[in-house]
Image (tube, rainbow, N blue to C red):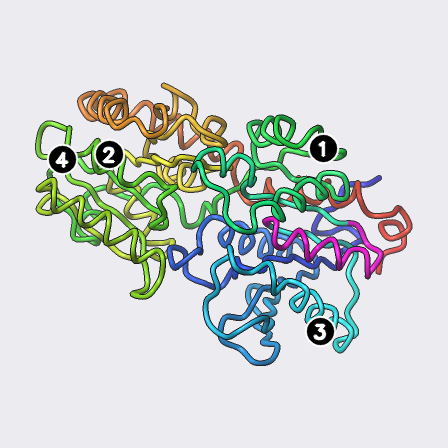
Amino acid sequence: MGHLHRSGPTPLRLALVSVHGDPLLPTGSEEAGGQNVYVRNVARTLAERGHHVDVFTRGRDCRAAEIHSVDRYRVIRLPSGPNGFISRDRLFEHLPEFAGRVREFARAQGRSYDLVHSNYWLSGWVGMRLAEAWRVPQAHTHHSLGAVKYAAQGTVPPTGQERLAVEQALLSRSAIIATSPQDVFSMRRYYGHPTDVTIVPCGIDEAVYHPHQSSFSRRELGLPPDRPILAYAGRFDANKGIDCLVKAFARLEGDVHLAIAGGCDAATRDSAEFRRISGMVRAFGLAPRTTFLGKLEPQRLALLYSAADLCVVPSHYESFGLVAIESMGCGTPVVASRVGGLQYTVRHQETGWLVPARDAEALAMACERLLGDEAARRRMGARALAHVRQSFTWTRIAERLEAVYAARIAPPVLAGGL
C-alpha cells in the first residue's frame, strides 16, 4: 500500500473529532491545552499536504452550526447541550446529541469521509458511532488514559466507569495512536493489549518554537534582565503540580525568579486553582520574585521559553508533555516529573532532568544543580534543540499519521482516489 504524500493521487477526506478541544480556542483558557494544540496542528499540516480536513467540536456559544475556514481546513462548531462552557466531566450526557449533529451536518453538506480521527475518550465515543454509521475506519488518540489519571489523583469522577469502558472498546475497534512508549505500556497494564497501535508523538511548529535572544525575550515580557528564571506554562489544574513547583521554588537559594504562564476565567474551576497557587506564592513571601503572565499566544510562549534558564513541568501525570518539547525547541532544558510521556520526551541528564512527581525537595535540588552549572545548561539546551528538530516536527508527525490512515483505509479508496 503506497505512502501518502502531498503530490500523491489520493488526498483523503478526514473528519477529526475533538468535542471539548476546540482548536480555535487560545491555549491556556479553561480546559484548553495540549489536545487543542495537537488537533490544530494535525489539521493544519494534513491540509497543507493536500487532504480535506474537517474538525468537529462543540460550540460553546452557538445555536446553529458555525463553519470557520482556517489554514485550508475547516472547524465546524456544533451546538450540544446548554450554551456556554461545560466541563468535560459533564459532557458525556450530551454526546448522543453531538454525534447526531455531526451526521446531520455531513448529510446537509453532502460530505463523506474516508476516516474518522477522534481525540480523547469523549470524542472516541462519538467517533465509534460515526465510523459505524458512515462505514469508515477510525483512528484514535487518547491524550490521557482514565485508569492512569485516576491512579495518579486518587479519585474517580462520576463518569469514570463510562470512560474506562469507552477506552476499553476503542482499543479493539480503532487504530490507536499512542504518543509515547509509556502510553503503550499504560494501555497494556490497565486495559490489555491493543489490537492495532502505533506510536506517533506530538510535534511543534518550528516557525514558532525556536530560540530567541534571552535579553530580548525578557525585555518583551517584562522579566528581570539579570536573574535566573524558572518558567512554567500550562493550565491551572491541580494535576499540573504547580503547588509542588511553588514549594520547590521557596527552597531555592539566591535571587531566582519564577514566571508562570496560564490563564483562567473568573467563574471557572481553573480560577479556583489560580487563587490557590497565587495564595501559596503570597504565603511563602514569593510574590516579589514571581510574575503571573496570564495566557500567552504561541509566539510569546516561545519568548518565555527563550527567556528562561529552565522550564519546569511538575505534572502528576502527562500522556505526552507538549510544553516540554516546546521549551526544548527553543533551546531551553526541562526539569520535569518522571511520569508518563515526559519520560519519552525528556532525556534524563541529556536534554533535561527528571525527578519523582510530587517531590518538592527533589525538584528544588534538580533546579538548583542546573541553575548553578551554566555549561551543563548550555549543553542540554543544544541537545534538546537537536532532539526536537529530529523527532518532533509536525511535518514528520503528519507523515506518520498518513501511514496509520493508509493502513486502515480499504485499498480501493487509496487506489481509485476520490
What residue is disc 2 on?
Answer: 309
2 or 3: tag closer to the N-terminus = 3
Disc nearest the viewer among 3 and 4: 3
* Mark 4 neighbour class, 10 Å CA radius: few under 14, some 14 to 19, many 20 or more: some
Indicate the amino acid at tag 1: Pro
Horizontally, residue 102 falls left or right of residue 328, namely right
- In the rendering, which numbered label is found on residue 256? 4
- Distance from the alpha carbon under mark 1 to that under mark 3: 32 Å
Indicate the amino acid at tag 4: Val
**In magenta stretch: residue 136:** yes
Horizontally, residue 61 falls left or right of residue 310, namely right
Using the image as rendered, state which of residue 220 and residue 169 is in the foreground: 169
Across and down, in percent, residue 218 comes to 19, 47
SS for callout 1: loop
Horizontally, residue 64 falls left or right of residue 321, namely right
Disc nearest the viewer among 1 and 3: 1
Magenta span of residues: 120-137
Residue at image location 32% in from the left, 22% down from the top: 379
- In the rendering, which numbered label is found on residue 194? 1
- In the rendering, which numbered label is found on residue 5? none
Across and down, in percent, residue 116 comes to 72, 54
Disc nearest the viewer among 2 and 4: 4
* Mark 1 neighbour class, 10 Å CA radius: few under 14, some 14 to 19, many 20 or more: some
- Distance from the alpha carbon under mark 1 to that under mark 4: 46 Å
Using the image as rendered, state which of residue 68 and residue 210 is in the foreground: 68
- Distance from the alpha carbon under mark 1 to that under mark 2: 40 Å
Disc nearest the viewer among 1 and 4: 1
Across and down, in percent, residue 341 comes to 50, 32
- Distance from the alpha carbon under mark 2 to that under mark 4: 10 Å
What residue is disc 3 on?
Answer: 105
